[in-house]
Image (spheres, grey):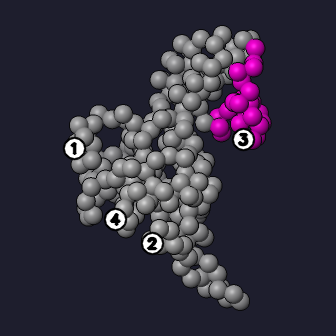
Amino acid sequence: MKYLFLDIDGVLVHYFTASEPIDGSLLYLPKRQEFEGEHFHPLDPACVERVNQIVYATGCEVVLSSTWRNNAPMGVLDRYFRSEGATFEVQQKTPGGGGYRGTQIKEFLDTLGHSDATIAVLDDSSDTKPYMDRLVHVYHGWNEGGVLDEHVDQAIALLAPPETQVEKIRAVNITDAEAFVTMLVDVGVSTRILADILDTGPSTVKRWIEGVTKASVPMRHWYRMKLLEHLEREQ
């Protein structure tokens, strides 16, 4: 199992989404919007898309570890996130309302018998013991725009280790175009990595992934070689 333990404030919500300026003033007021009888801060679309990318690339399940889990029913939260652009489900949450976040994560994993699961913790706080080595720390996220591209790469690396990636890339049958595309998703190759390899922008990468089934076998062989070179540099 793979789990991404997701914080909200400082990750998907930050100062500039949670507040709005008063006309003619340097002051800001809290900004909330009504959804199914609840009131939430708007999510940053760019931050939501970055979490979408982590989930898409690694196949992980999202577990809400934010205090938001105590503010509304999970079904409402799931529908709200989807209305804000999330393509992942939010159906699970850590237990308890107090104590260290790491303790709550451990209780969640132990209760399910998944103490050996592969996890990443995406959070602007650092109270994640005993999982400090699994923390993707969105440091000063509240003031600096939430989760960034660099955090996406860190989370993918934790949830899809390079050793596993290399093995799967080497094993893929490059004569099978659909298998090649599946491999890209399965090993957690982020859009940012592909943009670097192809020396192009993210939008072009998206079109390339959609059209890769038409690529020749020699071209897929070249892409595989470049992926392996990139991952070996990263190790």
Report which residue position mark 4 lands on.
70
Q: Secondary structure at mark 4?
A: helix
Q: Earlier in the sequence, mark 2 or mark 1?
A: 2
Q: CA distance from mark 2 to mark 1?
A: 32 Å
Residue type for callout 1: Thr
In this rendering, does residue 212 appear at all? yes
Report which residue position mark 1 lands on.
111
Identify which residue, 178 or 141, lies in the foreground. Answer: 178
Percent coordinates x, y for residue 21 in the rendering: 64, 81
Would you place residue 194 above or below residue 21 in this image? Answer: above
Percent coordinates x, y for residue 63 in the rendering: 38, 49
Q: CA distance from mark 4 to mark 2?
A: 15 Å
How packed mark 3 is, by other alpha carbons closer than 10 Å (few <14, some 14-19, many 20 or more), is: some
Report which residue position mark 2 lands on.
37
Report which residue position mark 3 lands on.
202
Mark 2 and mark 3 in contact (Cβ < 8 Å)? no
User: Closer to the observer: label 1 or label 3?
Assistant: 1
Residue under the image location 76 percent in, 14 percent down: 216
Q: CA distance from mark 4 to mark 1?
A: 19 Å
Q: Residue furthest front?
A: 36
Quadrant in which the N terminus appears: top left
Identify which residue, 128 or 220, lies in the foreground. Answer: 220
User: Closer to the observer: label 4 or label 2?
Assistant: 2
Residue type for callout 2: Gly
Would you place residue 207 above or below residue 102 in this image? Answer: above
